[in-house]
Image: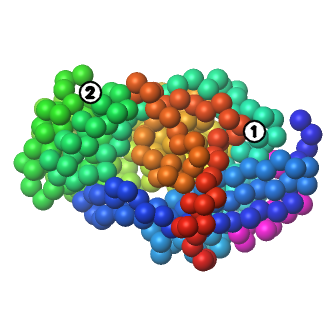
């Protein structure tokens, strides 16, 4: 494959409705603010990727960072691993967490997409893996027993999901247990139930609720404590049988390495946007393999479908579709398995009319 040189990196921002909204004990997310970066090369091939900064308030700042950092790459070779190292070193004084990491990840994923498109191959093949179907878990958006039970039943019937995850954190433990019982009644005994507390519990309450939930055969307890409480998470693991899951809020491979060294989790689920894009994910996958920790994904279903086949300890793909309504070909799921697209790169083909409709002037 001939070398590629970056001619331009353009940035678009959209603020589309997220239907239905994503609810948890902390907030209600009803919008899907996305920043899309497109790499244009002198030789012709292009590539793109998106990030999801969660709130419209961060959309302008994220787009500006991607645009400004991208401008510094004009004239450079499309060499994402080299640029990842240089950019992370260059931002060491400012720091490479938060929006800086999100911007760097967006550019990294777009660069890898460019390489794969130039090679006319799915990204996973460029990473040395076959595009094999990946087992999903359906990540539910509702809140409360009745809504969750209905949504879980639809996920099993429509997607063939063999695992469902939902948010807990009601003021009363009994209400959380009612949600689990309602979902179990809706999906039957053969579907795994996973729960997520979004870092919302104290240490004593995490133990109390974890013990009650494991009695209901919950298969993972996600983020029961703040992500930086490695000591608390490690202690909690020793008190429970239910596996502790975490990782979506690790900033870069260093954050993951710290948590794994502390024994903070049984399972991990890095987020492509926060872990450092494709390059950061590859480093994360190496860490997970070294620690023999099963590794799932967090949102970004299109990128995750390409990355998990190249992950030695691949576990489950989180199916929570944020960008699908804006794409010509949303990720397809059949019989509980995500079908990795055969299209080149990440497989992202945007509906221009939808992007124009929801364009944000940032």
Q: Nearer the viewer, residue 172 or 331?
A: 331
What is the spatial separation of the Cα atoms under label 1 and label 2, in whole angstroms?
36 Å
203 or 72: nearer the viewer: 72
Q: Is residue 235 visible?
A: no
Give the image's coloring scheme.
rainbow
Depth check, front residue: 90 or 2: 2
Q: Give above or below for 166 relative to 100.
A: above
| 336 on left or right of 122 | left
Residue 25 at x, y percent in the picture: 24, 59
| Predominant SS of the magenta segment | loop
Query: Regarding mark 2 in the picture, which secondary structure is present there?
Result: loop
Q: Quadrant of the N terminus?
A: top right
Residue 257 is one of the magenta-drawn residues: no
Identify the residue at image location x=52%, y=25%: 133
Of marks 1 and 2, which one's residue comes earlier in the chain?
Answer: 1
Q: Residue at x 59, y 46 (%)?
A: 328
Quarter in which the C terminus is drawn: bottom right
Residue 233 location (% of width, % of height): 32, 46
Q: Residues within 10 Å of mark 1 (few under 14, many from 20)?
A: many
Marker count (numbered): 2
Please say whether residue 72 is one of the residues in the magenta stretch: yes
Q: Position of residue 209 (x, y in %)?
A: 15, 45
Q: Indicate whether 355 appears above or below 262.
A: below
Q: Do the residues under discs 1 and 2 have CB atoms within 8 angstroms? A: no
Q: Mark 2 — residue?
A: 191
Residue 353 appears in the figure = yes
Residue bounds of the magenta highlight? 67-79
Q: Residue at x 57, y 73 (%)?
A: 360
Image position, residue 50 (x, y; %): 60, 55
- Residue wearing tag 1: 116
């Amino acid at each position: 494959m001939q070398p590629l040189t970056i001619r331009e990196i353009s940035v678009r921002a959209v603020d589309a409705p997220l239907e239905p909204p994503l609810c948890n004990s902390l907030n209600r997310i009803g919008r899907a603010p996305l920043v899309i970066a497109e790499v244009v090369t002198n030789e012709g091939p292009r590539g793109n990727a998106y990030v999801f900064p969660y709130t419209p308030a961060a959309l302008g700042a994220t787009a500006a960072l991607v645009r400004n950092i991208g401008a510094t790459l004009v004239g450079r070779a499309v060499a994402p691993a080299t640029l990842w190292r240089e950019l992370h070193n260059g931002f060491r004084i400012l720091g490479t967490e938060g929006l800086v990491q999100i911007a760097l990840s967006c550019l990294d994923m777009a660069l890898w997409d460019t390489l794969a498109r130039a090679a006319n191959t799915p990204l996973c093949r460029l990473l040395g893996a076959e595009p094999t179907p990946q087992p999903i878990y359906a990540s539910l958006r509702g809140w409360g027993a009745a809504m969750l039970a209905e949504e879980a039943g639809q996920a099993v019937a429509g997607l063939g999901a063999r695992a469902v995850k939902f948010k807990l954190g009601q003021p009363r433990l009994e209400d959380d247990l009612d949600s689990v019982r309602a979902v179990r009644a809706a999906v039957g005994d053969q579907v795994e139930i996973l729960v997520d507390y979004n870092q919302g519990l104290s240490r004593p309450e995490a133990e109390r609720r974890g013990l009650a939930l494991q009695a209901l055969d919950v298969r993972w307890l996600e983020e029961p404590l703040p992500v930086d409480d490695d000591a608390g998470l490690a202690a909690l693991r020793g008190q429970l049988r239910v596996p502790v899951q975490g990782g979506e809020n690790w900033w870069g491979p260093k954050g993951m390495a710290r948590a794994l060294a502390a024994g903070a989790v049984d399972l991990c689920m890095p987020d492509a946007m926060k872990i450092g894009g494709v390059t950061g994910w590859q480093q994360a996958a190496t860490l997970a393999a070294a620690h023999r920790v099963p590794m799932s994904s967090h949102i970004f279903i299109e990128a995750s479908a390409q990355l998990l086949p190249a992950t030695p300890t691949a576990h489950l793909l989180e199916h929570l579709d944020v960008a699908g309504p804006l794409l010509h070909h949303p990720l397809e799921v059949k019989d509980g398995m995500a079908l990795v697209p055969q299209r080149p790169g990440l497989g992202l083909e945007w509906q221009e009319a939808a992007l124009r409709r929801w364009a944000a002037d940032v």
